[in-house]
Amino acid sequence: MKHNKRCSAITAPRKDITYCFYTKLQFESPVKQRLVVLTDITNEPDDQESMVRLLVYSNEYDIEGIIGTGSKYGPSRGDIAYFERLIDAYGRVRNNLQLHSGGYPTVAHLKSVELGVHHYHL
């Protein structure tokens, strides 16, 4: 257990004495935030780059859903094939990511929480 040492000179009966107080520091492990991703990922680079970034930091979150979204203007957006390609690529580098920090979800887990295209006519 680490201690935080704080010393101060107190103007008490003896000014030549420095009093030190020790406080126990207790650290709690962080709780992973639950996350559901809605995206209209298609051939646009920014959507794919955001998904790659999410996968690189996926050990920080509890990913509970990856949902492709479409609309009446882009019904083919959010196609599950885009997710499959990115998750497969993540699977090829996951072991390397695990060397630096643990807790990365498996490819099987990510594929189990992905859902196909849902069309929202907004």
Image: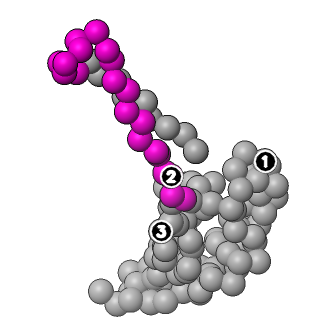
Per the image, label 1 sits on a secondary structure element best described as: helix
- Kind of residue at badge 2: Phe
Q: Quadrant of the C terminus?
A: bottom left
Q: Is residue 43 on the magenta stretch? A: no
Task: State the residue at coordinates (69%, 68%).
Answer: 105
- Alpha carbon distance from label 1 to label 2: 23 Å
Residue placed at 43% from the left, 30% from the top? 5
> According to the image, label 3 marks what residue?
33
Which segment is the magenta one? 10-29
Q: Is residue 90 left or right of residue 116?
A: right
Vertical comparison of 53 with 77: above or below: above
Q: Nearer the viewer, residue 17 or 47?
A: 17
**Tag 3: amino acid:** Gln
Q: Residues within 10 Å of mark 1 (few under 14, many from 20)?
A: few
State which tag comes first along the sequence, 3 or 2: 2
Left or right, 57 with respect to 96, comes to: left
Indicate the quadrant containing the N terminus: top left, top right, bottom left or bottom right. top right
Which residue in the structure is indicated by mark 1?
99
Q: Which residue is mark 2?
A: 27
